[in-house]
Image: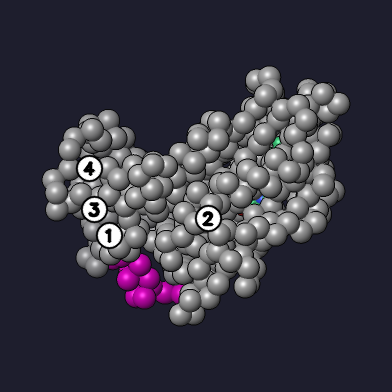
């Protein structure tokens, strides 16, 4: 009996390993483990055995079943993997083909707002900078004066990767777009006038937070830059973005490790039929954070703080989109619901321009 079982296992594992496609593998599974299968038959035969026989044969038959089950799972994984590889190698999608009108997509409000921001800031002499979304500890934290022990680290709810940087510290999904400015300061000499829009990640998920969200940060490095330049820039940006001349800002003292002094910026709004409409100064809501770049951050990037000064700001793009275009649930941005996209999406050729209206 014992050597019969061993022979049976060898045969079954051999046939399973040789199954050339999922259908052949399924046939082997049914033949072994199906209702009428050989292993199932052996398991059933346990009932008719004497207690002594069952004690010796039971574990062997169960071991056979486990070995066959594991072999099927491993062959299935190998066949599925090979099938995926074949599909990836053969299936192609030509992204440049024109789309038939009933299927025509729309521009997502986040992309639209990013285009609007690029347009507005280009008019002020800023260019758009980008950088990696997987960052090392130094670019995301260290250079910005957020050391490991700093409470701001905990506030960032960081996603850590398996990969490590040169110092053996885990790589992170960037928690803000600030590392883009660090990289820009290292790579080019001032004057620097950039915005850094892009995806950012924090382990946070509720009605007002998604684990992936979008930020735009701005950075100016030049000689003789003051808080006055910061306020004028933000005012000019927000007036253009909300397409209103009565946008009023209120700057409150705040604290960020990478700016000194730091200011939180509130924007005035009025209530019309229960909805917030930007402009005026009836009510205030916090819109963005900003400040003068900390001298140590400049020094970390090889700039002499006695020669160069700068300001920086950071703002959630999702929030900018919601305020301008009237969405009230952040999570709908990422549901991929075509009805939502048709309602809030923008036509592909409605490119925002300052003269044509940025929110075309
Ligand atoms: C460098 C130096 C300074 C960027 C800044 C903020 C203040 C800020 C938040 C607003 C809402 C992020 O999306 S949010 O949660 N940001 O409050 N960001 S100052 O400061 C920098 C960046 C880079 C080199």
- State which tag comes first along the sequence, 2 or 4: 4
Q: Nearer the viewer, mark 1 or mark 2?
A: 2
Q: Which numbered disc covers residue 342?
A: 1
Quadrant of res 181: top right
Q: Quadrant of the N terminus?
A: bottom left
Q: CA distance from mark 1 to mark 3?
A: 44 Å
- State which tag comes first along the sequence, 1 or 4: 4
Q: Is residue 108 left or right of residue 32?
A: right
Q: Which numbered disc covers residue 101?
A: none
Q: Position of residue 292 (x, y in %)?
A: 77, 41
Q: Is residue 158 above or below residue 47?
A: above
Q: Is residue 223 in view?
A: yes
Q: Which numbered disc covers residue 245?
A: 2
- State which tag comes first along the sequence, 3 or 2: 3
Region in magenta: 39-51
User: Disc 4 beta carbon < 8 A from ligand 1?
Assistant: no
- State which tag comes first along the sequence, 1 or 2: 2
Q: Nearer the viewer, mark 2 or mark 4?
A: 2
- The single residue placed furthest to the bottom in the displayed view is 273
Q: Nearer the viewer, mark 3 or mark 2?
A: 2
Q: Is residue 300 above or below residue 103?
A: above
* Pointers 4 and 3 in contact (C-beta within 8 Å): no
Dot 1 falls on a residue whose secondary structure is: helix
Q: Position of residue 354 (x, y in %)?
A: 42, 42
Q: CA distance from mark 3 to mark 2?
A: 70 Å
- State which tag comes first along the sequence, 1 or 3: 3
Report which residue position mark 4 lands on: 21
Report which residue position mark 3 lands on: 26
Q: Is residue 260 left or right of residue 81?
A: right
Q: Is residue 316 left or right of residue 321?
A: right
């Amino acid at each position: 009996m014992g050597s019969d079982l061993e022979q049976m296992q060898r045969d079954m594992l051999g046939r399973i390993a040789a199954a050339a496609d999922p259908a052949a593998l399924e046939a082997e599974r049914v033949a072994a483990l199906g209702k009428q299968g050989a292993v199932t038959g052996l398991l059933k035969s346990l009932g008719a055995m004497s207690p002594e026989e069952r004690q010796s044969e039971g574990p062997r038959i169960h071991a056979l079943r486990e070995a066959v089950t594991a072999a099927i799972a491993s062959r299935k994984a190998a066949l599925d993997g090979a099938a995926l590889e074949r599909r990836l190698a053969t299936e192609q999608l030509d992204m440049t083909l024109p789309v038939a009108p009933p299927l025509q997509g729309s521009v997502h409000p986040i992309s639209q707002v990013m285009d609007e921001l690029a347009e507005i800031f280009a008019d002020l002499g800023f260019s758009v900078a980008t950088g990696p979304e997987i960052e090392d500890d130094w670019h995301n934290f260290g250079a910005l004066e957020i050391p490991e022990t700093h409470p701001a680290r905990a506030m960032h709810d960081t996603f850590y990767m398996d990969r490590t940087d040169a110092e053996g510290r885990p790589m992170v999904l960037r928690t803000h777009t600030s590392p883009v400015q660090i990289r820009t300061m290292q790579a080019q000499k001032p004057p620097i006038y950039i915005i850094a829009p892009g995806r950012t990640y924090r382990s946070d998920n509720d009605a007002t937070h998604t684990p992936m969200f979008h930020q735009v940060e701005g950075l100016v490095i030049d000689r003789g830059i003051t808080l006055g330049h910061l306020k004028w820039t933000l005012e000019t940006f927000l007036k253009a973005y909300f397409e209103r001349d009565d946008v009023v800002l209120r700057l409150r003292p705040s604290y960020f490790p990478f700016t000194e002094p730091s200011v939180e910026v509130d924007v005035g709004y009025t209530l019309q039929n229960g909805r917030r409409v930007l402009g005026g100064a009836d009510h205030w809501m916090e819109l963005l954070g900003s400040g003068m770049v900390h001298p140590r951050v400049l020094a970390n990037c090889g700039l002499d703080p006695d020669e160069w000064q700068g300001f920086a700001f950071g703002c959630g793009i999702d929030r900018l989109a919601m305020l301008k275009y009237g969405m009230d649930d952040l999570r709908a941005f990422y549901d991929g619901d075509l009805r939502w996209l048709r309602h809030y999406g923008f036509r592909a050729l409605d490119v925002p321009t300052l003269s044509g209206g940025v929110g075309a």
